[in-house]
């Protein structure tokens, strides 16, 4: 089981994601429930800390 930190910058259309595992990686995904579920499913067996900015209604999908 790995320890992973995920930081998310939220906008109405995308989530800009920074993941710190052994290395740091950056990418964007759509701000849609199905896309978010598919992304988070990859980490279900790991210890994950998720930090996000509170942008009102745009973070509801997450």
Image (cartoon, grey):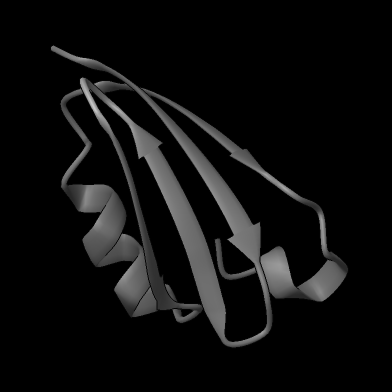
The residue at the far right in this view is: 56
**From what the image shows, is residue 1 above or below residue 27?**
above
Q: Is residue 52 left or right of residue 30?
A: right
Q: Vertically, is 9 above or below 32? A: above
Q: Is residue 56 left or right of residue 29?
A: right
Q: Residue at x 58, y 87 (%)?
A: 13
Q: Which residue corresponds to the image point at 44% horizontal and 46% vertical from the top-left?
A: 18
Residue in the picture at 69% in, 64% down: 59
| Residue 57 drawn at (x, y percent) | 80, 74
| Res 45 → quadrant | top left
As drawn, is 52 to the left or to the right of 62? Answer: right
Q: Is residue 57 above or below residue 7?
A: below
Q: Is residue 53 left or right of residue 56?
A: left
Residue 51 position in % (x across, y down): 61, 36
Among the 4 quarters of the image, the one containing residue 29: bottom left
How many marks do you count on the picture? 0
**Relative vertical location of residue 42 with respect to residue 43 in this rendering, above or below:** below
Q: Quadrant of the C terminus?
A: bottom right
| Picture quadrant of residue 20 | top left
Q: Position of residue 10 (x, y in %)?
A: 65, 65
Residue drawn at x 86%, y 67% as measured from the top left? 56
**Depth check, front residue: 8 or 38:** 8
Q: Quadrant of the N terminus?
A: top left
Give residue 43's position: percent from left, percent from top.
22, 37
């Amino acid at each position: 089981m790995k320890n992973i930190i995920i930081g998310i910058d939220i906008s109405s259309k995308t989530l800009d994601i920074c993941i710190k595992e052994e290395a740091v990686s950056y990418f964007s995904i759509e701000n849609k429930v199905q896309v978010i579920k598919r992304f988070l499913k990859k980490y279900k067996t790991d210890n994950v800390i998720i930090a996000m900015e509170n942008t009102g209604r745009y973070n509801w999908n997450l």
